[in-house]
Image (spheres, rainbow, N blue to C red):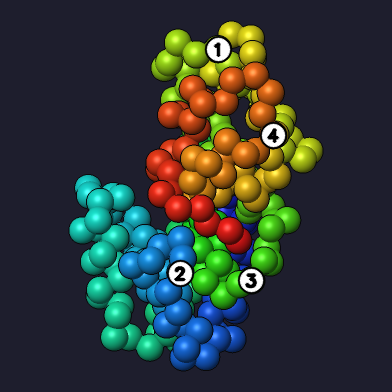
Amino acid sequence: MNEFAEAYAATRKRMSDLARSLDHEALNRTAPATPEWSVKDLIAHVTGIGSDMLSGNVNEVGQPSWTEAQVRSRKERPLDEVLREWEELSPKLEELLGGLHPAMAGLTLADLVTHEHDVRGALGDKGARDTDALRIATDTYVRTAGRSLKATPLPALKVQSEDQTWTIGKGEAESTLQAGRFELFRAIGGRRSREQVLAFGWSGEAEPYLETLSLFGYRDLPLEE
């Protein structure tokens, strides 16, 4: 397996082990990052994504009707049954990830890592913040934001996070953003408010870059995790 497939497999195992350890109350706890879904719903969602990718049901990828169908079709099924489905489809899914363009494989992984931390956020669990999966997913998200930035007249932005540095956009960087990897990942993934992102370490202008930095917009209210 390549690094995307290996990271996906490790993340699936972490999430499955965590889910199996939870009682009924915890499984039905609402995730603050996704207030329409419980922990169990999030497991159904990521399982459904894998199933839909393998079956070719991707014409409406990302649409509310697509994601809601994944959750609804597994709503009444026991958790163990849903986790078994995810486990059984994973070898083929990991093989698929190994053959995808790195940008697409990275976004698939990043979506799973996003939901891992949505689950952990519901539980008040601050684990899994130093994984290979988070490192790869953050790199993917930063590079994806960089492609959006290139389409604007803004100068490049230097992004610094722990042991990684990127210069995204075009030309010379005139502003710098510094943030921890987990916070940077959650911000680009739409799990932070504008105010939270503006409170990161910035030098130079910050506000103009917010329009392209988050791939999914910003929360109205701050989310502390």
Disc 1 to disc 3, how far (Cα)? 38 Å
For label 2, the residue is 31
Q: What kind of element bears circle 4? A: strand
Kind of residue indicated by mark 4: Gly
Count neighbours of disc 1 (C-alpha within 10 A) and say few if under 14, some if 14 to 19, many if 20 or more: some
Disc 1 to disc 2, how far (Cα)? 37 Å
- Which x, y percent locates residue 87? 49, 74
Q: What kind of element bears circle 1? A: loop
Q: What kind of element bears circle 3? A: loop
- Which x, y percent locates residue 133? 63, 53
Kind of residue indicated by mark 2: Ala
For label 1, the residue is 155
Disc 4 to disc 1, how far (Cα)? 18 Å
User: Residue sitting at 60 percent across and 79 percent down?
Assistant: 17
| Residue 208 seen anywhere in this rendered image of the structure | yes
**Do residues under tags 4 and 1 come within 8 Å of each other at their CB atoms?**
no
For label 3, the residue is 125
Kind of residue indicated by mark 1: Pro
Q: Earlier in the sequence, mark 4 or mark 2?
A: 2
Q: Nearer the viewer, mark 4 or mark 2?
A: 4
For label 4, the residue is 201
